[in-house]
Amino acid sequence: MDRRNFIGMLPVLPMVSALEKNEKVGFGPIVISTWDFGRYANAVSWKTMEKGGSALDAVEKGINLVEEDEHNQTVGRGGLPDREGHVTLDACIMDQDSNCGSVMGLENITHAISVARKVMEKTPHVILIGDGALQFAMDQGFRKENLLTPSSEKAWKQWLKTSKYEPRMNIENQLYRKQPPMPGGKDNHDTIGLIAMDVKGNICGGCSTSGMAYKMRGRVGDSPVIGAGLFVDNEVGAATSTGVGEEVIRCVGSHLVVELMRMGYTPEAACKEAVLRIVKKSPEKSKSIQVGFLALNKKGEYGAYALQPGFSYAVKTAGTEIVIPGKSYYP
Ligand code: GLY
């Protein structure tokens, strides 16, 4: 089913303030993911878990939907290219047993998260990059295709006129909500991060992106870096991030959030602490970039925190289907 038909079947979701929402959802299947478009991924993940499917399958299938959506210019097919016009994808996945797989700079394959899963399941390695990742994907039966859609090519050619390289805050929601751009730099970034807990209480997560638009050729952000863009510890919970990956890597952000939850922080407090770490390390830069963290703990509690307003996340449980504006450090 293509995304438009799929979306047509979904009800309009309420936007719920995190303050209005009781973040304790109790034990049971749950899926949370970054940005407004996470709701579509969540719906697919939920269908998988509703039938008794694993959190791992739920993560892969939910993210696959976003990767296929060529109207989404920050993930998968239709992603904005690097400055030389190549669409290069980064993704990683991690399961309840701390197995993990990752691809960096993968070209011509839409489902980067599925290739990452194959790396996890079929190789003795964790990360494959570039041509090696592509070769592996083709050996595994993935189909090669052109990921640069006419609309992304047009945007890139427009960008070439100035070649000004600055991250654009909350581009994910700008492109989705078709709102006027927020103040901030020009074009850039990113990511679907999705965390699921299944009926058995197992937590898995995944992250997939075309990275920062018009990035330097070969640039890799946080999304495929285990511990930065994603971390899962099935005893504690999981976290994922979105935004300017360089800052997330510098504080190993998702691992930090999970370790803080291990120490007793709530998911939101842990995400906030990771954001504060970024502010402390990069006080000036933090004013003009976006980074958001999203986390789930073993009790089914979730929370998020971002540098800037504009970040949102989507939550699906048996009784809840909502998109929540993330709280932020800067007003
Ligand atoms: N967070 C995605 C990136 O920086 O590439």
Image: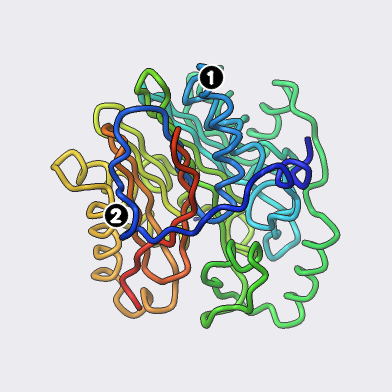
Q: Residue at x 56, y 72 (%)?
A: 168
Residue 271 disc label: 2
In this rendering, the answer to whether 196 lies above or below 193 is above
- On the image, the x and y values in percent for residue 278 come to 30, 65
Of 71 and 30, which appears nearest the observer? 30
In this rendering, the answer to whether 207 lies above or below 133 is below
Which is in the foreground here, disc 2 or disc 1? 2
Disc 2 to disc 1: CB gap under 8 Å:
no
Side of 165 where 32 appears, left or right = left
Q: Quadrant of residue 1?
A: top right
- On the image, the x and y values in percent for residue 163 come to 68, 78
Of 192 and 136, which appears nearest the observer? 192
Side of 65 where 189 appears, left or right = left
Q: Residue at x 73, y 62 (%)?
A: 84
Q: Residue at x 49, y 20 (%)?
A: 54
Near mark 2 (Cα within 10 A), the count class, few <14, some 14-19 or many ≥20, is many
Q: Label 2, label 1: how many angstroms apart (C-alpha)? A: 32 Å
Q: Residue at x 80, y 71 (%)?
A: 157
Q: Amino acid at mark 1?
A: Thr
Side of 167 where 305 appears, left or right = left
Residue to which mark 1 is pinned? 123
Q: Amino acid at mark 2?
A: Cys
Q: SS for tag 2?
A: helix
